[in-house]
Image (tube, rainbow, N blue to C red):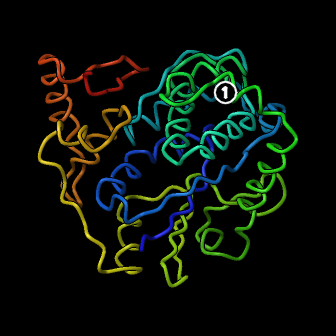
């Protein structure tokens, strides 16, 4: 039986976005031995919450180079027209995830990439729909049309409540919780790993891949571990969604070693020249997908 992974996240969180390389590495190593569940946090319901905390578009963009230099994910540096609440994007992810986890993950990725690499606003309905329309199997307009339905709001509030139950647990003990709107909540990305016997271990907030590795080794030492891929081409045989350079480099990295991003980038460019990959410029980097 698979280990259940509860993934508390929010498309507006730069830490959740920066953790994508580690999460892709988990997926590569353990595949269907992990059964993922996305739970959206709902960091803000109104943009004024960010404004009251002193956030401005200029302040937010000025922090992006720190994340890029440290973790490698692409960012755009255009100053947006304003700051965005994350509630509507969270509900869009939730609705996509209700169709399938794969679509939920793809929706999360699409909205993160839109938020962190373009001038589009995360709370804008048209921008949400356009981002989701890039995902095969999703109808962005249909999802946006449902965002304010009573039943959707009810399910969303249940997810927000689940995300606000971190008081007294390992995440709070490690200083990785928050209480910006009252209850002690999980920060993004927090992962709870639950074994078939009900035992669980928690990795609150942003963590390195080694933290997840230790948790899984303790929960189930019998898990099969896929060795790192021998080639960049092998990565695209496993993953169906497009990937950033940082995600590919992390999956290909030697255990306990920093990703060799330069060498991986050179190989990706070579595969693109051969017509095997397609490179899409994205912020200060690129998104790579297998050529059709």
Q: Is residue 128 above or below residue 192?
A: above
Q: Is residue 51 above or below residue 255?
A: above
In the displayed structure, does residue 125 sit left or right of residue 9? right
Residue occupying the point 84% across, 36% down:
149
Residue occupying the point 46% across, 38% down:
67
Total labels drawn: 1
Q: Position of residue 274 (x, y in %)?
A: 11, 18
**Front-lying residue, 128 or 282:** 128
In the displayed structure, does residue 176 sit left or right of residue 247? right
Q: Position of residue 251 (x, y in %)?
A: 27, 48
Q: Residue 47 lies in what quarter of the image?
A: top right
Residue occupying the point 21% across, 55% down:
257
**Front-lying residue, 35 or 262:** 35
Q: Residue 70 lies in what quarter of the image?
A: top left
In the displayed structure, does residue 236 sit left or right of residue 152? left
Residue marked by disc 1: 122
Residue occupying the point 18% across, 59% down:
227
State which quarter of the image contains the N terminus. Answer: bottom left
Q: Secondary structure at mark 1?
A: loop
């Amino acid at each position: 039986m698979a280990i259940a992974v509860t993934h508390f996240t929010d498309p507006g969180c730069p830490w959740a976005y920066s953790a994508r390389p580690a999460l892709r590495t988990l997926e590569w190593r353990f595949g269907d031995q992990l059964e993922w569940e996305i739970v959206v946090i709902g960091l803000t319901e109104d943009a004024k919450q960010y404004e009251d905390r002193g956030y401005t578009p200029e302040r937010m963009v000025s922090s992006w180079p720190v994340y890029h230099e440290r973790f490698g994910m692409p960012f755009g540096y255009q100053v947006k027209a304003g700051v965005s609440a994350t509630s509507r994007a969270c509900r869009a992810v939730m609705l996509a995830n209700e169709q399938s986890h794969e679509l939920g993950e793809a929706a999360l990725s699409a909205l993160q990439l839109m938020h962190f690499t373009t001038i589009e606003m995360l709370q804008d309905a048209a921008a949400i729909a356009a981002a989701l329309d890039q995902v095969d199997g999703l109808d962005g307009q249909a999802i946006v049309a449902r965002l304010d339905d009573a039943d959707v709001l009810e399910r969303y509030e249940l997810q927000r409540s689940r995300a606000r139950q971190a008081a007294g647990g390992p995440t709070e003990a490690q200083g990785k919780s928050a209480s910006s709107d009252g209850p002690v909540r999980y920060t993004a990305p927090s992962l709870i790993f639950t074994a078939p016997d009900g035992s669980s271990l928690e990795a609150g907030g942003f963590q390195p891949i080694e933290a997840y590795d230790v948790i899984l080794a303790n929960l189930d030492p019998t898990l099969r571990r896929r060795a790192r891929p021998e080639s960049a081409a092998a990565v695209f045989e496993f993953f169906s969604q497009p990937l950033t350079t940082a995600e590919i480099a992390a999956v290909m990295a030697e255990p306990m070693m920093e990703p060799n991003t330069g060498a991986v980038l050179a190989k990706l460019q070579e595969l693109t020249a051969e017509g095997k990959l397609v490179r899409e410029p994205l912020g200060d980097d690129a998104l790579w997908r297998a050529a059709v």
